[in-house]
Image: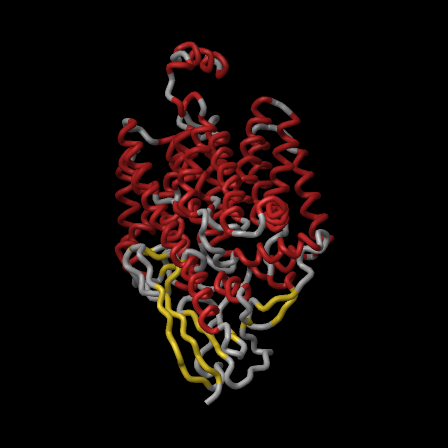
């Protein structure tokens, strides 16, 4: 029986449209509602981590549309040109600048705009999964519920916009090859080009599309379009060369990087933990769990050994599931999914400057599709496993929001209290804390700065590029501000080794438990 005949048979056996559940009659509307419900609690989240870089670039673009990085800033302890600091292409900032003409620059409206990118990524996963599994809606919902995706979707960085273009490029490419429609292939090539202009990793869509075309015995000449776009961008800006150098900073200890990557991959795709017993081949899962325990024991488990073991086991399970899918199905789709996962993992562990959630985010749709391909359980069991995944993601999301908002609250409190002091307020650290401190009139500390006695210096407890005591000028502490968190989890916390944005802080993307309060120490310079 041909594929078209089987499709007609399924259509004839299906119940009339008006009798089907809402999510089956209007899947995209259902996904839009689910995305809105998931992201609404984070609409007023403060800008955090690298968000300010994209916002500042967007603000500059609003006045200088043909010179996206033509300004200077202190992001690494000294004043530098923005094109040396920013390690991403400018399309995300152009999107923010365009949105600001309607919404302004406040956090809530920009988060709403970026929620559209999140929905586009979820909808793209559904479209891609339609030809790969009988449960495409489950694949899309699991993508939304993955901790990496949900937390990333509450920021205004380049990751989710890139992923949206990435999955749509694959979805349109696959459909264009199946239906032999050149228009879809050209549109897919255009989406691949856009993915690379949002974030450099988006370029990885091109080799995946080429391999898929070759497996389908098609030439794929349309991929010359994204390649030409990338080359033109490089010649115009020379930014790709700087990004490549930045990406190759960390290449030491590949074994440690592998464990980190497994831990982050498992934490980000935690859905596999809850769906593991709803799939076949439990013996594979037992072997994976035993391997994870052995890895954690051998590496010494620096923090949270139980959680690290679970995350490493799930991370191993991701690769085991992808390999099993290829072995059992042996189709172009299964090979595409495995190459997608392997390519993302290799880049994150061995090419990127750090292992982090942002570099492993592209795993989410591929793993979600694999789960949907292999799950065999009742509807109630699937709903329960999906809800458990969403609960973990929401907890990580609220933890990340708590840290982000603490930065904003601290900046507001400190600047209101010391606004009339008559002396300059300096601060250490960067990320979202820098955005709000500068917005209120404070100055980032730099080694090229000229300090004066009686100036103030603020030091956050959890941030980057903090000075040691030998680097600070003479001072005395006049106040310590504490901002506690009510969320029993952390994504950014040195003592807990929570390291969502960089494994320099620890081996876990998020950690459960009560985090210590964020502290901000105010120092008066001079003896």
Displayed quadrant of residue 165: top right
Residue under the point 38% across and 36% down: 324
Residue 357 rendering spot, x and y as whole percentages: 44, 52
Residue in front for this viewpoint, 99 or 305: 99
* Position of the N terminus by quadrant: top left
Which color scheme does this rendered protein use? secondary structure
Residue under the point 40% across and 54% down: 400
Residue 337 rendering spot, x and y as whole percentages: 47, 37
In the visual, does 235 lie left or right of 400?
right
| Any part of residue 255 in sight | no
Q: Is residue 165 above or below residue 495?
A: above
Residue under the point 60% across and 37% down: 210
Residue in front for this viewpoint, 432 or 369: 432
Residue 391 rendering spot, x and y as whole percentages: 32, 43
In the visual, does 288 lie left or right of 106?
left
Residue in front for this viewpoint, 356 or 37: 37
| Total marks placed | 0
Direction bottom: furthest residue: 527
| Any part of residue 19 in sight | yes
Residue in front for this viewpoint, 510 or 172: 510
Displayed quadrant of residue 37: top left
Direction top: furthest residue: 12
Displayed quadrant of residue 273: top left
Residue 140 rendering spot, x and y as whole percentages: 43, 34
Residue under the point 39% across and 13% down: 14
């Amino acid at each position: 029986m041909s594929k078209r005949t089987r499709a007609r048979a399924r259509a004839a056996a299906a119940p009339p449209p008006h009798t089907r559940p809402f999510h089956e009659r209007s899947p995209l509307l259902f996904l839009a509602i689910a995305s809105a419900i998931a992201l609404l609690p984070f609409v007023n989240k403060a800008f955090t981590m690298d968000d300010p870089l994209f916002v500042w670039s967007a603000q500059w673009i609003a006045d200088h549309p043909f010179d996206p990085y033509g300004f200077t800033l202190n992001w690494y302890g000294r004043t530098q040109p923005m094109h040396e600091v920013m390690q991403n292409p400018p399309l995300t900032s152009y999107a923010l600048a365009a949105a600001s003409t309607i919404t302004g620059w406040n956090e809530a409206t920009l988060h709403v705009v970026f929620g559209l990118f999140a929905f586009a990524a979820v909808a793209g996963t559904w479209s891609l999964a339609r030809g790969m599994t009988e449960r495409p809606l489950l694949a899309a919902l699991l993508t939304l519920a993955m901790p990496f995706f949900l937390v990333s979707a509450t920021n205004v960085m380049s990751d989710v916009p890139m992923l949206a273009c990435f999955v749509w490029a694959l979805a349109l490419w696959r459909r264009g090859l199946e239906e032999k429609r050149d228009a879809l292939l050209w549109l897919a090539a255009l989406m691949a080009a856009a993915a690379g202009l949002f974030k450099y990793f988006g370029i990885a869509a091109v080799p995946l599309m080429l391999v898929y075309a070759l497996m389908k015995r098609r030439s794929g000449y349309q991929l010359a379009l994204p390649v030409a776009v990338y080359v033109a961008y490089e010649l115009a800006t020379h930014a790709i060369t700087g990004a490549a150098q930045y990406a190759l900073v960390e290449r030491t200890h590949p074994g440690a990087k592998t464990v980190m990557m497994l831990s982050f991959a498992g934490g980000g795709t935690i859905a596999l933990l809850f769906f593991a017993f709803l799939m076949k081949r439990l013996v594979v899962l037992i072997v994976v769990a035993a391997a994870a325990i052995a890895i954690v024991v051998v590496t010494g488990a620096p923090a949270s050994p139980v959680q690290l073991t679970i995350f490493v086991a799930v991370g191993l399970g991701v690769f085991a599931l992808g390999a099993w899918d290829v072995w059992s199905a042996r189709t172009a789709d299964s090979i595409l999914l495995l190459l997608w996962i392997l390519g993302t993992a290799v880049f994150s562990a061995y090419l990127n400057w750090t292992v982090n959630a942002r570099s492993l985010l592209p795993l989410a749709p591929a793993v979600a599709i694999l789960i949907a391909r292999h799950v065999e359980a009742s509807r109630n069991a699937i709903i329960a496993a999906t809800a458990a995944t969403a609960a973990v993601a929401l907890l990580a999301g609220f933890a990340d929001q708590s840290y982000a908002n603490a930065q904003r609250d601290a900046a507001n409190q400190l600047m209101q209290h010391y606004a009339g002091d008559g002396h300059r307020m300096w601060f250490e650290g960067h990320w979202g804390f820098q955005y709000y401190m500068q917005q209120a009139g404070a100055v980032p500390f730099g080694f090229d700065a000229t300090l004066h006695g009686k100036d103030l210096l603020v030091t956050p407890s959890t941030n980057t590029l903090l000075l040691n005591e030998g680097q600070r000028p003479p001072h005395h502490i006049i106040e310590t501000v504490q901002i506690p968190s009510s969320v029993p989890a952390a994504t950014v916390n040195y003592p807990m080794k929570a390291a969502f944005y960089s494994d320099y802080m620890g081996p876990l993307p998020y950690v459960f438990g009560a985090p210590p309060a964020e502290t901000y120490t105010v120092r008066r310079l001079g003896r």
